[in-house]
Image: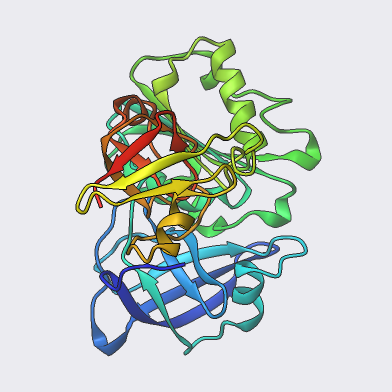
Amino acid sequence: MTMKDAGIIPVTIKTMKLNGTGNISVQIIAQDDNLLPPYFPGAHIDVFIPELGPRQYSLCGENGNGEYYEICVKLAEDSTGGSHFIHHHFRPGDSLTISAPRNHFPLPDAGKYLFFAGGIGITPLLAMAEHVAKQQIEFELHYSVSDSEHIAFLPRLTAPVLAKNVFIHDSSANDSLRHNTPLSLCQPDENTRVLACGPDGFIQRLEDIMRTHHWQENQLSFERFSNANIGKDAENQAFHIQLNSTGQRYLVGPKQSIAEVLLSARVDIMLSCEQGICGSCITDVIDGIPDHRDCVLTEEEKAENTQITLCCSRSKSPVLVLDL
């Protein structure tokens, strides 16, 4: 993996604390008394973990004045990766590096918002809800958890600014989207935008409900934990990529990604999640037709065919000319 040096920020872990069963909140501050770059709700950062490389985490704190960032990390079952390292090896006072914030899950303009969080998917949506509440825009925040012990950010969720608009759904009590669809989802409204973050099954269920009740597809924006398209390469075809700057062509085989081929050729690209969910490797397309397999670009952006995620997407045309 590689990432250009631009935008890399040295930071120090300020505090770590439990935040519901299995979750740990980490506050980080810039080194040398610097301020951290501003961001808007929905943004995430890469945290560079020793021997593992970058892992993506949503910024869940209020933007404030750049004094600190906050992330919340759930310890995945049987994890030996990023969440395991953060839970078991990070300590207050440790130095590490992060990327500057990126936002591929922005808050769109709307007259009303419906937020749906599945588990640790609360992290970007909490910041959005607080932002909307301060602007006195109508909203609902629906937060699904496996049981009440796993609720994160309970003091913020029950604070006066949010409390009356927050609905916590406890799956252990059969209170879930599947068993108890909120009335607001059964009443489509053209001025409302729906934003969701959670596991694939959670997002799929929400999409099915909205389709049943005749919402428009462009009213839903979501961020997944993983990309279900990864690994489905049985029907992949080989194609060439061409660098617009030099004219050099490279063959991408059925079991290779564009990013793998470019890195082997020592082409300097940004690469992070390798799943098409973080957006760090988005590159402009000069010519050709991408085969989009990411979860970052919107349907409108995919239809334009002017950008591609190098880590997972492919080409429908024999040659794809990239702005590299």
Give the vertical position of 132 relative to 298 (above or below): below
Give the vertical position of 35 relative to 46 (above or below): below
**Nearer to us in this view, 320 or 53:** 320
Which residue is drawn at the image coordinates 39% and 72% (left, top)? 98
The part of the image, by quadrant, that contains residue 262 is: bottom left
Tell me residue 132's x, y (percent).
33, 41
| Circle count | 0
In this view of the protein, can residue 184 be seen by the observer? yes
In this view of the protein, can residue 105 be seen by the observer? no
The part of the image, by quadrant, that contains residue 142 is: top right
Which residue is drawn at the image coordinates 54% and 20% (left, top)? 185
Tell me residue 16's x, y (percent).
54, 77
Tell me residue 65's x, y (percent).
24, 68
Give the vertical position of 254 relative to 211 (above or below): below
Which residue is drawn at the image coordinates 40% and 23% (left, top)? 219
Q: Is residue 224 left or right of residue 138?
A: right
**Nearer to us in this view, 321 or 226:** 321
Give the vertical position of 59 relative to 168 (above or below): below
**Which coloring applies here?**
rainbow
Q: Is residue 171 left or right of residue 68?
A: right
**Nearer to us in this view, 192 or 138:** 192
Tell me residue 324's x, y (percent).
25, 52
